[in-house]
Image (spheres, rainbow, N blue to C red):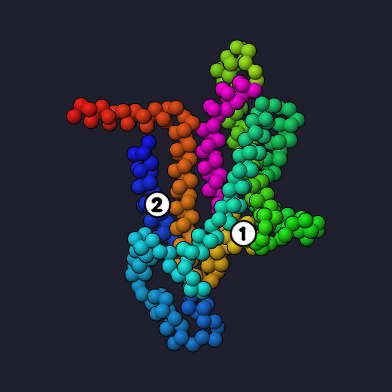
Amino acid sequence: MGKYIAKRLLMMIPVILAVAILIFTIMTMVPGNPASLILGADATQEQILIKEHELGLDQPYLVRLGSFLKQTFIDFDFGTSYWTSTSVTDELMVRFPRTLIIAGFAMLASIVIGIPLGIFTAVHEGTLADRIGVLLCVIGVSMPTFWLAMLFVLLFSLKLGLLPAQGMGGPEYYILPVIAQSLGGISGMVRTSRASMLEVVRADYVTTARSKGLSERKVIYGHGLPNAMLPIISVLGSNLANQLGGALVIEQVFSIPGIGLYLINAVNTRDYPVAQSSVVFLSVLFSLVVLATDLCYAAVDPMIRAQFAGGSKKKKRKEAAG
């Protein structure tokens, strides 16, 4: 298992490196001069050239790319913001917990609510509850998250005055963002869990378990659910990545100072170090999520565990024979 993890970590390096080169190139090609935006419309051409030299923007593309890659992957420094002159690394560490709270609680809601509902609708296939659940899931998946978030602001903040519309404060400031962010994930989890369980409940081994007189609960949760978990785990991994990505949009709607708002503002102001470093940071997170998903596969599927164990035993035999 350790060798597999090390191999996957090494495979992450070219992916993250490619993302870094891509985002650097995109930001370089985006119209807009950071020096002009910082100095304002009244700046002279000479002042703009001096500012470009201070920021290193007058250097060739390959030189700037090499400096960016060295600073990021060798010095482990994300640089300094053009606008605020603050450390990008420090800002990311301060803002990341806010993004993680939204994505984490939305993910938790999709697991705690989505999986049981998916199992319930699968067990009660064809009933009125199943049809209503499927209809609600289709609606939940179809609604854009930002549109749903704005509806929540209009209803619960402006009309009813129950919850704050934006900003940061106590736990109540996270309620609307988490609910708006989680509904799509819950709907997707219900659909996946239902489809996976429908395949399982029709299997021969489930019929055999029922014929032995086992309770329906033990049949479903003891025999059916473990075999239905692989598709669910695959969706959980992608769902967590989607929750992190979706939190960037939610932060913009609710003005939450997380990584999403930080990234969007950096793109709008052409703050290259912030935009580039934020994307690299998120790419590392997404890669770790994919790795965690693969490890969950190994924890659930005995065949994958046997492959890891087999590789380890084979290595021990060779060492013993040598």
Amino acid found under the numbered disc labelled 1: Glu
Tell me the mark number nearer the camera, choosing from 1 and 2.
1
Q: Relative to 250, say whether 131 is above or below.
A: above
Tell me, yes or no, whether the highlighted magenta stretch contains residue 229: yes
> In this view of the protein, can residue 108 be seen by the observer?
yes
Mark sitting earlier along the chain (1/2): 2
Q: x and y percent of residue 66 in the render?
A: 34, 65
Taking the view exactly as shown, the residue that stands out farthest to the top is 212
Category of crowding for the residue at label 1, using alpha-carbon neighbours closer than 10 angstroms: few (below 14), some (14–19), many (at least 20): many
Taking the view exactly as shown, the residue that stands out farthest to the left is 322
Taking the view exactly as shown, the residue that stands out farthest to the front is 170
Which quadrant: the N terminus? top left
Category of crowding for the residue at label 2, using alpha-carbon neighbours closer than 10 angstroms: few (below 14), some (14–19), many (at least 20): few
Whole-number angstrom distance, CA of label 1 to CA of label 2: 27 Å
Q: Secondary structure at mark 1?
A: helix
Looking at this view, is 223 or 168 the one in front? 168
Magenta-colored span? 217-246
Residue at mark 2: 15
Choose top left, top right, bottom left or bottom right for residue 70. bottom left
Residue at mark 1: 251
Choose top left, top right, bottom left or bottom right for residue 109. top right
Q: Secondary structure at mark 2?
A: helix
Q: Check if mark 1's residue and mark 2's residue have beta carbons within 8 Å.
A: no
